[in-house]
Image: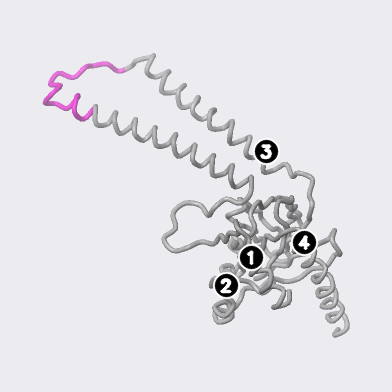
Amino acid sequence: MSHRLSAALAAATALLSGAAEAAPHDWQLGFQPAVTPVMARIEEFHDLLLWIITAICLMVAVLLVWVMLRYNSRTNPTPSKTQHNTLVEVAWTIVPVIILVLIAIPSFRLLYFEAEIPRPDVTVQVIGRQWYWTYAFPKDGGFQFDSNMLKDAVAKEKGEPRLLGVDNPLVVPVNEVVEVETTASDVIHSWSVPAFGVKMDAIPGHLNHTWFKATQLGTYYGQCSQLCGANHAFMPIEVKVVTQPQYAAWLAQAKKKYAADDAAVVASR
Ligand SMILES: [Cu+2]
């Protein structure tokens, strides 16, 4: 992407209300803000589990305190000789099973929601490489481009976050289903964008599928999430979610630019 176009895109996205930026920040607790239906559901499921585990922890703590106070040798000098209590034993087996089944139902529902890809509007092929990403648009002109991490000084100059900003970000339209096919050319990588709730292994000789539908304009960052070698930590992901007309404009210039790049590569051989 040309500097002028990327600057214009950044300005336009910042101007529009609801434009967001999701990146990790210092002392962060919890998730980055959810901008896809999948991530919204992951957050809901996470909160549900947090309520359940909190209730269980409180119950165990109360039982412990009760046992310590009520059944210590001072308050209970002649202990009971009870060894079995069928009712209690059946209950402490059945109740956890019921809790696990109750957790499994929304868990499977979420897994299927993630796994079933709706009709895609855009298809992006993501190729993991040591140590950068290649993005290909097989159904929109068949061009592809590399996305490399910016050096610290360049990132600072461009106002990009250190170790997360890239030279050529992936650009996708807002409110449209983006199908992501992941693969790799050397070792296993993993394409992961927390705000989208997407983390998919990129495996050589294998195509994995996932999807996202970003509902908010903005810039979202992620990182390779599979230990892939020396520069594993230095192959960040940057996704710009833009309006449909901005996407069309980006696509038109990208087709020309990267087709020209490919031609230049062929000519130089
Ligand atoms: Cu990697």
Image: 158 above or below 59: below
> From the viewer's perspective, is the residue at label 2 or at label 4 nearer?
4
Of mark 4 and mark 1, the one earlier in the sequence is 1
Q: Vertical placement of 73 versus 212: above or below?
A: above
- Mark 1 neighbour density, 10 Å: few (under 14) some (14–19) many (20 or more): many
Identify which residue, 222 or 187, lies in the foreground: 222
Q: Which residues are magenta?
A: 67-83
Residue 114 placed where, x, y %? 67, 43
Q: Which numbered mark, 2 or 3, is in the foreground of this view? A: 2
Q: Which residue is mark 4?
A: 245
3D distance between C-alphas at marks 2 and 4: 24 Å
Amino acid at circle 1: Glu
Residue ID for mark 1: 238
Q: Which residue is mark 2?
A: 160
Give the residue type that dot 4 points to. Answer: Pro
Q: Residue at x 60, y 47 (%)?
A: 39
Q: Which mark is residue 112?
A: 3
| Quadrant of the image occupied by residue 216 | bottom right
Quick one: quadrant of the C terminus? bottom right
In the image, residue 32 sits, relative to residue 64, either above or below, namely below
Image coordinates for residue 6, horizontal then vertical, percent: 69, 72
Q: Earlier in the sequence, mark 4 or mark 3?
A: 3
When asked about the image quadrant of residue 20, the answer is: bottom right
Q: Which corner quadrant holds the N terminus?
A: bottom right
Check if mark 4's residue and mark 1's residue have beta carbons within 8 Å: no
Residue 160: percent from left, percent from top: 57, 72
Q: CA distance from mark 2 to mark 1?
A: 10 Å
Q: Is residue 232 left or right of residue 269?
A: left
